Image (cartoon, rainbow, N blue to C red):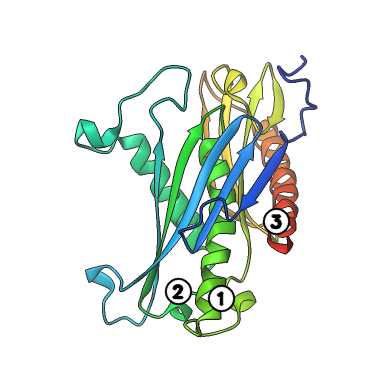
Amino acid sequence: MARPDGRAADQLRPVTLSRRWSIHPEGSVLVEFGNTRVLCTASVTEGVPRWRKGSGLGWVTAEYAMLPRATNTRGDRESVKGKVGGRTQEISRLIGRSLRACIDLKALGENSIVLDCDVLQADGGTRTAAITGAYVALHDAVTWLAERKALAGKIEKVLHTSIQAVSVGIIDGEARLDLMYDEDVTAEVDMNVVCTGAGDFVEVQGTGENGVFRRAQLDAMLDLGVLGCAELAAAQQKALAA
């Protein structure tokens, strides 16, 4: 069946990575996957969490949030509710884990980098867009540290690989790449794939939404995920070269 936006099954939505979108953070990127837009900022702070003090290691962590009207109906701010929802916590941890896979934390010294990923507009794939954009913001923050002689090593050694993520799924029996919302809500299988720039897997999250799925379908989705991440890696490098 034709996709809602006319794309081929193995085609990403248009991807844009706009660096220096905000003037204050050490790194900032507005990432767009089609109509999904996420602002990713990287803030460098002195010190590390209490449990890490004295280790000589830095820390990278992430916080994810969605603006009240990022979707077609308004949602309450979690700060007003007085607690962070489980989905928000899970995505924040996913982003943090994914980005820690690409960095030598010892080279940071006892400094922290906090990645804030705020969804301005949601149309599917917000967590994968956040990871993809957060890597570029992290790269700019590490560059900022290097320029101030606060990094123990060359940037390309400290950030030893790039990190990207993309959604894949099965809709009407067909494996598709980079699901928009209308596809995501009807998917028989929904999966998020996080890869390094070399094509290795950092994390794979997959669920049969309406039953089980076959090994052949899993292989097809993983192949699409690796293909999509390779294209996103090229987009990241293009943005960083600009």
Given residues 69 and 211, the one toward you in this image is: 69
Residue 81 quadrant: top left
Which residue type carries mark 2?
A: Leu
Q: Position of residue 70 (x, y in %)?
A: 46, 28
- The C terminus, quarter of image: bottom right
Q: Which residue is mark 2?
A: 105
Mark nearer the N terminus (2 vs 3)? 2
Q: Residue at x 54, y 19 (%)?
A: 185
Per the image, the residue denoted by label 3 is: 239
Name the quadrant containing residue 88. Answer: top left
Residue count near mark 2 (Cα–Cα under 10 Å), binned few <14, some 14–19, many ≥20: many
Q: CA distance from mark 1 to mark 2?
A: 8 Å
- Report the amino acid beneath label 3: Ala
Rendered residue at 57%/46% (across/down): 30
If you read the primary sequence from the N terminus, does the residue marked by circle 1 or circle 3 appear first? 1
Q: Say which residue label 1 marks.
A: 158
Which percent across, then down, holds residue 148?
A: 50, 81
Q: Could you tell me which secondary element the residue under label 1 belongs to? A: helix
